[in-house]
Amino acid sequence: MAASYPSAVYGGFSGSENLVSDRAKGANPWEYSNETILNGASSTNGIFGAGGDRNMTIDGLTLTSCIATAGQAIYQRPNMTVQNCKFTSNACVALRYYISAASKSANTLNCYFYNNINTVSGGAEGGCIMANNASAGGTYSVTGCEFDSNSATAAGSGASAGIKAQGVGNVDVSRCIFKNNNATAGNSSAVSLTSATCSLKNSLIYGTSVATNKTALYVTAGSVVNCTVVNNLGGAIYLNNTTSTAAINIINSVFWGTDIKSGQVAAAAGCLGTLSNCAYTSLSTNYTGSIINTVDVTSTTTGLFTDPTNNLWTLAQGSVLIDMGTSTGAPIIDLIGTSRPQQSGIDIGAYEYLVTAVYNPHVEKLVFKRSGDKLVAEVAGIASVYDVSGRLLLKNKVNVGDRISLPAGVFMVQLSTSAFSIIQKVIL
């Protein structure tokens, strides 16, 4: 009998590689020095479509310019993995997942969604990902993805510029970043959860525009756990379930902004649910569900986060969010992989405060010296570089004199030795 092998489609090659792992990459998982671009502008069916289960991987491609009537750039089905891909400037759903058979799973990992503009008239969809796990059992996971400057005009129930998750099966969204996404219709600018088996964990959401007047999150059922939802001028989250206290669970999450609305937990009249160990700038009087161990940040404008001006949403030293969460349901690591807890308790939000780290706001100090577009190590240790969203860009062991090259921008660089750990802000 002939052997059966899983299929795969890989991009990012120059043509001289011997192995898939030889592909030259940038700082992010989806950045390839030799970009493979698939343009769907002339296709009415998108770029990839699976009619049923597919034991395959799609890796390292840029999928762009699909038209509104295409439906989606990729139609993902059970057993498929989509990873390290970019979805840009698509006018339809970028990635659609659907399952009708029980106990099957699929994954979307480390993908980047930028400037997708879902213009499907009246559609009840997610602009970047439409996840419909329509049968009990099995899990569709979205992990380590970034959603940047996407928009949607779809007006249907639960429609979102980012992700819409629904179905009786599990849809788990974790360790993702949503920034500057906006919807002019529908219900949310970042994520809509419409089933009790859907969850959003360890994720950061910021930067929705007041012009859209759509909240960052819309939840009719499901869980939001250890999320940081900040500076969304259209509103932080809208809760809408009047039938079951157990349907909505918001745990260890912070909703904050420079004004009341951008950190508001809004709700439909008579809304039920459970808010446990959360912080917010205001809570709608329409919410009549359970409230457990809430941290009041109604009048807090400073001291919560490291550098809100530059969208650095890690916790500041002494933040009232430190140790105020519950271990019940909390993920064992945070958005950037730090283990929980670091101190006596779980922290509120997507980031666990590094108790051993000392934040140094100066550009040049002790552990690194700046030289043009490079950092020169003054001390040997483990160097970790983060962008202003808190995403880990690289982690290397460095010796005295080693150089780290970075593009222009603002970065947080942590260096850890056996004696200390220090974080410094670097502007290049």
Image: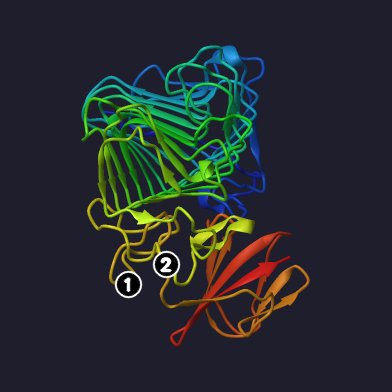
247 and 56: which is toward the camera: 247
Q: Amino acid at mark 2?
A: Tyr
140 and 200: which is toward the camera: 200
Which mark, by number, is residue 353?
2
Examine the rendering and report whether any part of residue 84 can be seen.
no
Badge 2 vs badge 1, beta-carbon distance below 8 Å:
yes
The residue positioned 58% from the left and 70% from the top of the image is 413
The residue positioned 28% from the left and 19% from the top of the image is 100
Q: Residues within 10 Å of mark 2 (few under 14, many from 20)?
A: many
Position of 137 with respect to 76 (left or right) is left
Looking at marks 2 and 1 on the same chain, the residue that comes earlier in the sequence is marked by 1
Residue 338 drawn above or below residue 10 = below
Distance in Å between CA atoms under marks 2 and 1: 8 Å
Q: Amino acid at mark 1?
A: Gln
56 and 88: which is toward the camera: 88
Q: Which residue is outermost to the right?
A: 372
Question: Residue 357 at what x, y percent from top left?
Answer: 47, 76
**Residue 168 occupies which quadrant of the picture?**
top left
Position of 423 with respect to 8 (left or right) is right
**Residue 331 occupies which quadrant of the picture?**
bottom left
Which mark, by number, is residue 343?
1
Examine the rendering and report whether any part of residue 89 can be seen.
yes
Question: Residue 426 at what x, y percent from top left?
Answer: 67, 69
Which mark, by number, is residue 364?
none
SS at mark 2?
loop
Q: Quadrant of the N terminus?
A: top left
